[in-house]
Amino acid sequence: MEAYLTAMLVFAGIYALMALGLNVIWGLTGMVNLGLVGFFAVGAYASALLTKYWLWPMPLGWAAAGLAAALAGAVMAVIVARLRGDYLAIVTLGFAEVVRIVASNEVWLTNGTDGISGIPGPWRGAVSPQAFNLIFLGIVWAAVGIAFLLLARASHSPFGRVLRAVREDEEVAAVAGKPVLWFKLRAFCLGAAVLGLAGALYAHYNAYIAPEGFAPLLTIYIVLALTAGGVGAMRGAVLGALIVLLLLEGTRFLAQEIPGVTPVQKAALRESIIALSLILLLRVRPQGLIPERTRTRASP
Amino acid sequence: MADWRDLLQVLVNGLMTGSVLMLPAIGFSCIFAVLRYPNFAVAGFATVGAFAGWVANVQWGLPVGLALLAAFLVAGAVGLAAEETALKPLRPAGPLTVAIASVALTLLLENILRFVFANDLRGYDLPVLRDWRFEGIRINPQQAMNVGYAVAAASALFALLAFTRLGRAMRAVADNPALADIKGVDPGRIARVAVFLGAGLAGFGGMLIGLDTSIDPLTGFRVILSVFAAAVVGGLGSIPGAALGALVVGVGEEMASVLLSPAYRTVTAFLAILLVLTIRPEGLLGRRG
Amino acid sequence: MTRYGISRRAALLGTGGAVASFAIGGRAFGQAPAVVFGALPPLTGAGGPYGPAMLRAIQGVVEEANAAGGIRGRQIRVVAEDDQTNPDAGVRGARKLIDVDRVTALMGTWASSVTTAVAPLCWENRIPLFTVSGADSITLLPHQGFIFRTQPNSRLQIATGADFLIRQGARRIFHLAAQSPFAQSSQDVLLEKFRAVQGGAVAGYIVYERDKTAFRSEVDQILRARVDTVFLNGYLPDVTILLRELFRAGFEGRRFTPAYAVNQTTFQTLPNEVTNGVVTWQPSPDVNSGAFRRLQTRFGNVEVDPYSAQTHDHATLAILAAAQAGDASGVAIRDHVRRIASGQGEVVDNVADGLRLINAGRAVNFDGASGPVDFDDRGDIRGTKFRYERAENGRFVVMEIT
């Protein structure tokens, strides 16, 4: 039981990192990003390839993952800079799918649908599996803590204030003399870097990644996390991730207890409960559980 | 690709593919035009329509035409019910919130269908017809009929919008909600009609997809990105644009399949979106702002 | 299940576990605690058409075994989790099965990516994994004997199929493959086999995205290539569409596809004139074996799909191995699978007979619904035959078993 709970907390931590990254792009800057699983995948593949085939040390691999994802984020930012929210949603959704398809087909680079196995992990093999689990738990939540602190500081800094201004009204921000595109670019890069780091940690924890694992469903879970926690507030992202994981795993036990339905129906019920929870959460708290304290005076 | 005939065949194939995307794309744009949010649940409505048509055709023995009508009505009703219960209460929170809820809604619909019908693939009770051949170009009568149904449904919608009072009211709300309100148009009623029509058309289109492929809970989900591409390329909110966009995307995907690789079909859809949005951010027939 | 000492943190987590343990409950029938096996089939997602039947096959075997007295008097329980055809969900499901339900064997994984993701969890926790996944790389993992794959190595399967086609007179073949780990290796084998024959050629090779629903242009290319055979190397949803498209286009050649891509539901989805003549192949028990006779009767004369046949064997292997060992732990099962699956014992084809003989102290050799299920050192099966069937008026007719 302990191993299971530890593992679930590791996943919660990874989701929390992803939610933090999304929060920078969406919560702070207001740019919808339904393609976050694409940055997650870029980071995962970058670190996996560098550490497995080129034998880079893991911390360097993770840093490279963040950089690779940030680069992808920059490209995406330039492409979508002038798009409105609705178009943004659709285009970013397409981006994640493109990443997954490229990963599936370019066998020379990513090993295709076979995936990359045997990704090294910190002290994996040198300690017992449960000890590895616990060590990784520490690493992930340390990363969450650091990201949280850095991003919270950025959020309260002048940089963050400009991002919020861009979110509220782009044209006003532009009139106020802020180079909007440059700010959007930096926000995208920062958020994408965090997402890429989350991807790297995921790859090294599971020791295996495959294109099939980077499904659009994961994006929905993270959006759910952010919505549950409160779009805009960093603390909300972390809380939301924990809630999502509780929902995902809790419904498993719940569905098991329902009598008289076939296994397929149980599986369908479980996914239905998750979808319904998102809708209900949006109904009850459209601004999330930890709404951002609005500032009454916008600083220049 | 040395022959003009090969090129023409690819064009014909693309038109067939595109016409099947047309109706869900129109449904999507119809809802967007009046309600101003992207309703991602059209994928779910399409699957609902496919299954409703199946029940009508296979379990009740109705002919295809009536089954299509059943698909339209059931999907429209489901869409309207979902809108009223789940999505409308979220409108004050902004279009993005509603859009996210619509993503969850499509998941919910998929799983309700899975609960009732399981994962088994199903087919309609129809003969499979051999292709016609004209000058070496092959066209399938079934697919031609699908094009016919799609065009008929789209035309009916155009006619409704152009010639009826209801249609004029819908266009008024789409153009300028505030002004329409002042002129006595009931925005709530128009919204309901728009959702019913949009979801219904998506369901109709879903049955056409099912006629050409097969029916299972993932039917609508498989074409989701191409449908969005069609709506975006044509200009979000423009119904003729969605029809045109669907044909463009259909032909584009077929050409890409032939010139590049079928494994990159979705990439083509995405690139189509990007290309159009870079050159013309409001889409082919969309309006600025 | 060994524990590596209980740290304070684990103890804190353990209290959380106690709260949730109501859901676990290993209720004891009679005196001994139940044996718990885990199943991880795809109940939703791309594998959704296959998962439910795979799970039912496992449950059927377990019921039969329990009715025959279970494993040395201990009843057997199966806990199933949906892997959603996604390695991420699969890993979380596997962890729950291994750590919470304490399963001593895991079976029924379908997608190669799920199996590869879940395998390290299994061997680290010393639990055998029985799978139907086809990717060659799976048995090459450092699994210490804990993986048993009942699906023949894809190279073997394609090679045997190619030989069959060539015997049937195929010379020009078009290879249409869904994106998967074995698309390329299938192509390599086909090239090797067909080029070695006079007039033989692989006239076309296309790999398509799994969710593809329109194949008109691909069918155009097939027609232009003037082939006598088309190899549909895909899955149920896409092959169903392809068969319809080929019929529409008037393709008169041979259509060859794996048995999992065309099954009973296809006969309900497509009219007979479209499916007539399609040839499928799958691993099979020998035509003269009791296992083959059982296939026809035990599954109610309804065609059993290749995956369910294999998961039927997964459950039987695990149960008989545990009975033979007198111990249902993961390591004991691993060590005894080959003992009851091959060798000099009496041939059995079902779990009840096997249990009866084992309880009487006799040696058994299990031949399963998917073949003789003899495993080599790497966990691949060997010596299996293949059954070739042709669709005729809504039924499959056996052509040959070689």
Image (cartoon, rainbow, N blue to C red):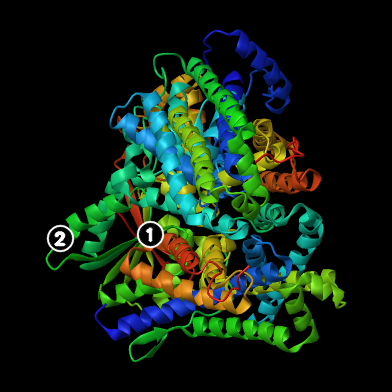
Whether tag 2 and tag 1 are in contact, CB under 8 A, the answer is: no
Can you say whether A251 is above or below B273 in the image?
above
C363 relative position to A185: left or right = left
> Going 50% across and 29% down the picture, which residue do you hit?
C105
**Discs 2 and 1 share one subunit:** no
Instruction: Tell me which corner region of the image, top left, top right, bottom left or bottom right, holds residue C64.
Output: top right
Judging from the image, mark 1 belongs to the subunit labelled B
Q: Which residue in the protein does label 1 denote?
A: B263
Judging from the image, mark 2 belongs to the subunit labelled C
Give whichever of C324, C391 is nearer the camera. C391
C19 relative position to C352: left or right = right
Can you say whether A92 is above or below C371 in the image?
below
Give whichever of A258, B82 is nearer the camera. B82
> Going 41% across and 19% down the picture, which residue do you hit?
A124
Secondary structure at badge 2 equals: helix
Residue B59 visible to the viewer: no
- Residue type, mark 2 in image: Arg
- Residue type, mark 1 in image: Ala
* Image mark for residue C195: 2
Q: Position of residue B212 (x, y in %)?
A: 52, 73
Mark 2 is surrounded, within 10 Å at the Cα level, by few (under 14), some (14 to 19) or many (20 or more) other residues, namely some
Separation of marks 2 and 1 at Cα, in angstroms: 26 Å
Give whichever of C116, B57 is nearer the camera. C116
Residue C43 visible to the viewer: yes
> Going 58% across and 23% down the picture, which residue do you hit?
A145
Mark 1 is surrounded, within 10 Å at the Cα level, by few (under 14), some (14 to 19) or many (20 or more) other residues, namely many
Q: Position of residue C277 (x, y in %)?
A: 38, 71
Q: Position of residue C296 (x, y in %)?
A: 48, 53
